[in-house]
Image (cartoon, helix red, strand yellow):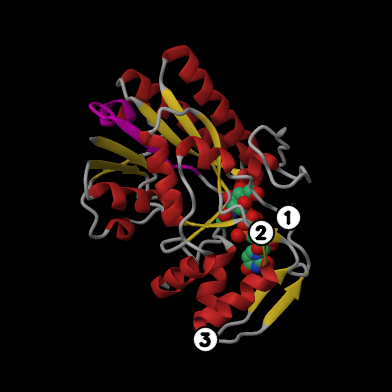
Amino acid sequence: MRYIVTGGAGFIGSHIAEVLSGEHEVVVIDDLSSGHCENLTGIDCEFVEGSITDLPLLQETFAGADGVFHQAAIASVPRSVEDPLATHAVNLTGTLNVLIAARDCGVRKVVMASSAAVYGENPELPKREEMAPDLLSPYAAQKLSDEHYAAVFSRLYGLSTVCLRYFNVFGPRQDPSSPYSGVISIFASRILNGDPIAIHGDGGQTRDFVYVRDVVQANLRAMASDAEGVFNIARGEQTDLNTLARSMMQAAGQEVAIRYGPPRGGDIRHSLAEISRAREVLGWRPEFTIQEGLAETMRWI
Ligand code: UD1
C-alpha cells in the first residue's frame, strides 16, 4: 500500500511513518515548521517538503495513494488564540485541502487528528463523543470544523474518513524545548537535568495521558476498518499532576524540587475520556501503561 503522512516529520506523524515503513510505501509531507528531519532518521520513506496549504502540491503527492494519515497542524491552543487567521489557514483550510486532494486522487480513506480540545470545560466526565462540544479557542473551533468537513466529504463524495480525538499524547520526539510541548516531555527533560519543575496550580488537575505508540495503533486500526466518524483516543484513566510528577521522579531515580505557581490561564481542571467506542468499533485498546510509556520517554530524552 502507499500511504501519505501529513506532518510526518512531527511527533505523532513520525511514529506513524516509522511503523508503516516496515511494510508499506510511505510518503511524508511536512513543512518543517514544527517537525524535524531528524525525527525521520532511519525511517524508510519519501520526504516531500511542503505545506498542506498548497493544494496543487497535495494533489500531486496524493496520486496513487491508498490512504492518508493527516497529522499536520499548528497544534497549539495559545498560538490559535494569538493568531486565529494563521492557524485557521493551516488547521482548517489545510485540512480542507487534504480532503479535496484525497477525493480528487481517489484515496480510499483519510484518518485525521482531532483533539479533546473540542470538549472544553464541559464538566461531565468521562467525555463521550456524542457530548455537546464546548469551544474555548480558535483551535477547538478549527478541529471541530475539520470533523464536520470530514463527515460532509464522506456523505457527499464517498471519501471514507475517521477523526481521532487525541487526549494528552506523550512519548519520544515530543520536543521538550517547544513552548507548546506537553507536560510530560517538559517534566522529563527537567527531571533528567536535575532542574526544578513548575506545577501551574495545586497539581490536583487531571489529564488522560496516552502513549504515542498506542496512538499509532489507533490510527492503523482506523485505516484498516470500514468505520467512520469520531473516536476518543486516550487510556480512559485520570492522572493528577502531583502523582505524575512523583512517578516521573521515581522512574528517573532523581528527585527535583516542585515549584507551585498560579494556575495557567485557560486550563481545564479535569479530563477523562470514555474510550469504549474505539474499543468496540475499531477493536483498539491502549497497551502501554503510563509507567511503560514514561520509561520509554525518559530513555529517549
Ligand atoms: C492538551 C493538548 C492540547 C489540547 C488540549 C485539549 C498536549 C501537549 N496538549 O493540553 O493540544 O488542545 O489538551 O484540552 O497534549 N503544566 C504544568 N507545568 C508545566 C506544563 C504544564 O503544571 O510545566 C500543566 C498545565 O497547566 C495543565 C497540565 O499540566 O494543567 C497539562 O498541560 P499540557 O501538557 O500543556 O496539556 P493540556 O493543557 O491538557
User: Residue sitting at 46 percent across and 62 percent down?
Assistant: 171
Question: What amino acid is found at the position of numbered circle 3 in the picture?
Answer: Gly
Distance between mark 2 and mark 3 Cα atoms: 23 Å
Q: Residues within 10 Å of mark 1 (few under 14, many from 20)?
A: some
What x and y, as percent, mark residue 227? Answer: 46, 29
Distance between mark 1 and mark 3 Cα atoms: 28 Å
What x and y, as percent, mark residue 61? Answer: 27, 32
Question: What amino acid is found at the position of numbered circle 1 in the picture?
Answer: His
User: Residue sitting at 33 percent across and 25 percent down?
Assistant: 108
Depicted 260 relative to depicted 154: above or below: below
SS label for mark 2 = loop
Q: Which residue is mark 3?
A: 253
Task: Using the image, tell me which numbered label, if any, was put on residue 270.
Answer: 1
SS label for mark 1 = loop
Q: Give the residues in magenta.
A: 58-73
What x and y, as percent, mark residue 185? Answer: 52, 67
Query: Which numbered disc, 2 or 1, marks the residue that appears first in the sequence?
Result: 2
Residue 118 appears in the rendering: yes
